[in-house]
Amino acid sequence: MLEILTCIIGTFGFSVLLKVSKQKLIFTVLGGTISAVISVLLLNAGEGVFKATFFAMTAICIYSEVLARVIKTPANVILLPSTIPLLPGGSLYYTLSYLIHYNAKLFARYAKETALTGLGIALGAIFVSIIVTFIKDIQNHFKSLLLKNK
């Protein structure tokens, strides 16, 4: 629970740093909450860091895309602060620390965790982006068919 609370505070802080408007601040914090809760729940359930990050990123990408259309704002305004809880800050720090201190075993462990987290973030965003593009293409196709029939 403490981890989720600190993620919410971190999301709020980064939202302020990124100059998100006051009207949209609640949406970015809610996105950070969603990503933190999904990630923490999956990690506590024994799922790996990749799966936890992938599903959390997929959820907040969908959340951002839907909300962008509802509140008429770019999806990135919501998405970027919402990803803060997923970033591999701790594992990246330890990766570099063990690299500098010549501890190959721990370096490899944290490097793998950092890479899997980054891969989960990237693939989650790509997955949703492909789906959104596919839906837009279908909508455009039907619009063009309707225009031809008029």
Image (cartoon, rainbow, N blue to C red):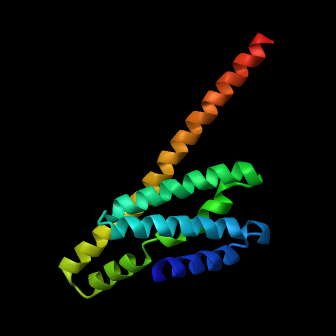
Relative height, residue 146 to residue 86 (above, below): above
Return the x and y of residue 1 as percentages of the image width and height.
Answer: 47, 79
For residue 9, side relative to residue 23 (left or right) = left
Residue at 35%, 61% (x, y): give it. Answer: 50
Q: Residue furthest bottom?
A: 101
Residue at 28%, 81% (x, y): give it. Answer: 99
Return the x and y of residue 4 as percentages of the image width and height.
Answer: 50, 76
Relative height, residue 116 to residue 65 (above, below): below
Residue at 42%, 62% (x, y): give it. Answer: 53
Residue 114 visible: no
| Image quarter in which the C terminus is found | top right
When asked about the image quadrant of residue 42, the answer is bottom left
Residue at 34%, 65% (x, y): give it. Answer: 49
Name the one closer to the observer, 5 or 146. 5
Return the x and y of residue 37 as percentages of the image width and height.
Answer: 48, 68
Name the one closer to the observer, 95 or 100. 95
When asked about the image quadrant of residue 76, the answer is bottom right
For residue 50, side relative to residue 5 (left or right) = left
For residue 20, side relative to residue 33 (left or right) = right
Return the x and y of residue 30 as percentages of the image width and height.
Answer: 62, 67
